[in-house]
Image (cartoon, rainbow, N blue to C red):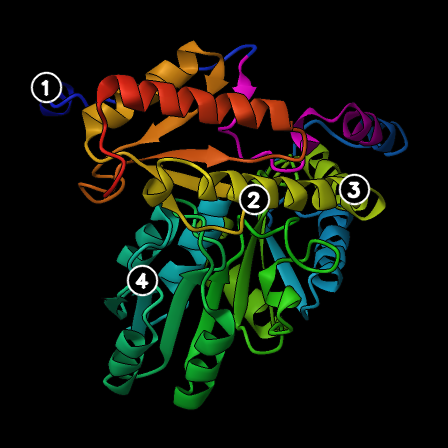
């Protein structure tokens, strides 16, 4: 703690009130949607439910509501089966810690989320990282893999906002008999014909062994699910410790998840609006004096690199003072020299808000004499 405080990296809890949201993962505005709140309340009024689940799914916490939701999720995401976890973190830790066994090989993209890293660390498999989105590096490691090989990636990366080359990854995994595991946290609700994720958008659902879908981002509620073959669901019920030893989600959460999916199906406009905002924002980055700072992205996650923890923190503080909720991502969360502002776009952001954001960025970086090239 003392060392972290001395280096200016001690974390603390904050919240913003009244600022323009360029920070949250509420890409479609569902978390703030009065219509979705009412839909959830109406569903509760029509269902006789308890306030808690009373135990783990393997003891007293299972219910028809949970199993009906999992059947719905499997159908929606075009998979054989689904298993609900209490959070995306739990789902990733549960999947990666138990699926690759001793003697197997787990190959992970170097930029996967911390939850996948933690799950990989708990696995008894041999683990190797490959360079981000580098198919040649991955293939070289697949050639040396022992046992069953597993490849773990994100479809949309949470810090850079770029996409994994999923089609090419599927080809490689097919060639070497490896199982592909894809975290769809930031693609759920955003990509696919109905928001099913990037895997379905690319028609790869039968070539990806497991997908992780979280509900606390674009869907605006809470929880997660692993979807894949039925044998995977049965395996996780027996070996995924976060599932086995956690009290199950309460009925309210299960209803909220189902309502969020139904709301997504009934309200496609926010998705179209979000993609319109992404394209508009990209046009503005290309016209920006700081063009070299922007990390190319066609997703709601846009990154503005400001090298150095202190300059990055200072730019974010200036934007926050101007009423724009933008947060800095500092090293060691990202590599030193790649510190950045992580800007999240939403269906409800306006062009006027974007213009203000760009104006403030230009003013503060000019005032601080921050270099405009990397």
Residue wearing tag 2: 56
Is residue 187 in view from this perspective? Answer: yes
N-term mark: 1 or 4: 1
Q: Quadrant of the N terminus?
A: top left
N-term mark: 3 or 1: 1
**Res 132 label:** 4
Dot 1 falls on a residue whose secondary structure is: helix
Q: What residue do we see at 67% from left, 31% from top?
A: 29
Q: Give the number of the mark in front: 2 or 3.
A: 3
Q: Quadrant of the C terminus?
A: top left
* Range drawn in magenta: 19-40
Dot 4 falls on a residue whose secondary structure is: loop
The Cα–Cα distance between marks 4 and 2, rounded to whole angstroms, is 37 Å
Instruction: Name the quadrant containing residue 231.
Output: bottom right
Dot 2 falls on a residue whose secondary structure is: loop
Q: Is residue 62 magenta?
A: no
Residue wearing tag 3: 269
Q: What residue do we see at 26% from left, 65% from top?
A: 131
Q: What residue do we see at 75% from left, 56% from top?
A: 194
Q: Give the number of the mark in front: 1 or 2.
A: 1
Dot 3 falls on a residue whose secondary structure is: helix
Disc 2: CA contacts within 10 A as few (<14), some (14-19) or many (>=20): some
Mark 2 and mark 1 in contact (Cβ < 8 Å)?
no
The Cα–Cα distance between marks 1 and 2, rounded to whole angstroms, is 42 Å
N-term mark: 2 or 3: 2
Q: Give the number of the mark in front: 4 or 2.
A: 4
The Cα–Cα distance between marks 4 and 3, rounded to whole angstroms, is 33 Å
N-term mark: 1 or 2: 1
Residue wearing tag 1: 6
């Amino acid at each position: 703690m003392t060392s972290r405080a001395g280096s200016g990296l001690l974390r603390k809890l904050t919240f913003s009130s009244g600022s323009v949201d360029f920070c949250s993962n509420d890409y479609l505005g569902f978390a703030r949607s009065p219509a979705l709140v009412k839909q959830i309340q109406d569903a509760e009024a029509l269902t006789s439910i308890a306030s808690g689940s009373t135990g783990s799914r393997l003891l007293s916490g299972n219910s028809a509501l949970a199993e009906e939701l999992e059947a719905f999720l499997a159908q929606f995401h075009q998979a054989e089966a689904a298993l609900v976890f209490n959070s995306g973190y739990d789902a990733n830790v549960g999947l990666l810690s138990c699926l690759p066994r001793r003697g197997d090989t787990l190959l992970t993209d170097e930029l996967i989320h911390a939850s996948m890293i933690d799950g990989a660390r708990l696995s008894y498999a041999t683990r190797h990282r490959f360079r981000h989105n580098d198919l040649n590096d991955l293939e070289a490691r697949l050639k040396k893999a022992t046992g069953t090989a597993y490849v773990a990636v994100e479809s949309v990366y949470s810090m850079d906002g770029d996409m994994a080359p999923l089609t090419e990854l599927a080809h490689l995994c097919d060639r070497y008999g490896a199982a592909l595991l894809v975290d769809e946290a930031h693609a759920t609700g955003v990509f696919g014909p109905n928001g099913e994720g990037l895997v379905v958008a690319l028609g790869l659902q039968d070539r990806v062994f497991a997908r992780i879908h979280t509900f606390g981002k674009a869907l605006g509620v809470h929880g997660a699910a692993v979807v894949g073959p039925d044998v995977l669901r049965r395996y996780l019920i027996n070996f995924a410790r976060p599932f086995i030893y956690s009290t199950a989600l309460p009925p309210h959460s299960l209803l909220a998840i189902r309502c969020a999916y139904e709301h997504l199906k009934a309200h496609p406009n926010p998705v179209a609006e979000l993609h319109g905002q992404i394209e508009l924002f990209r046009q503005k980055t290309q016209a920006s004096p700081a063009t070299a700072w922007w990390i190319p992205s066609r997703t709601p996650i846009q990154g503005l690199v400001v090298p150095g923890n202190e300059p990055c923190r200072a730019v974010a503080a200036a934007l926050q003072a101007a009423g724009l909720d933008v947060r800095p991502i500092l090293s060691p969360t990202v590599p030193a020299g790649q510190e950045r502002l992580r800007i999240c776009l939403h269906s409800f952001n306006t062009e006027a808000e974007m213009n203000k954001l760009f104006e403030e960025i230009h003013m503060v970086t000019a005032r601080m004499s921050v270099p405009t090239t990397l």
